[in-house]
Image: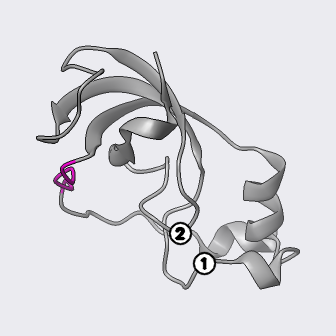
Amino acid sequence: GASCILLQYVDIPVPSPKKDEVLIKVEAASINPADWKIQKGLLRPFIPKFPFIPVTDVAGEIVEVGSAVQELKIGDKVVSKLVLGKVGGLAEYVGASERIIVT
């Protein structure tokens, strides 16, 4: 639909994980109902400030860990539901808190 016209491909720097985060190289992302409803403008009260990178459900491999991360390590295959409004799952790399990761 017309809302797809508003999507753009842009290069962004690879983020550095905070001390309690891991950096995930995204291998797959799924579009859930909240993602497409935001894109269509149906969830205006919850829409993050634009511009933002959409999609919150990702799977991938940990490529870097923050200094306080205890349970996860580089090379772990993980899934996560990212925090809406941060760098989203359509990016190549995303930072995610150790608390919201499943191995």
Tell me which corner region of the image, top left, top right, bottom left or bottom right, holds residue 96.
top left
Mark 1, residues whose alpha carbon is within 10 Å: few (<14), some, or many (≥20)? some
The amino acid at mark 2 is: Gly
Residue 85 badge? 2
Give how far across and how far down residue 67 sits, in percent. 11, 41
Q: Residue furthest right?
A: 42
Q: What is the quadrant of the N terminus in the image?
A: bottom right
Task: For mark 1, give the secondary structure.
Answer: loop
Q: Which residues are magenta?
A: 14-19
Task: For mark 2, give the secondary structure.
Answer: loop
Q: Going by the image, does 50 lie left or right of 43?
A: left
Residue 6 badge? none
Residue 48 badge? 1
Q: Going by the image, does 11 lie left or right of 88?
A: left
Q: Of the residues under marks 2 and 1, which one precedes in the sequence?
A: 1
Most common SS among magenta residues? loop
Check if mark 2's residue and mark 1's residue have beta carbons within 8 Å: yes
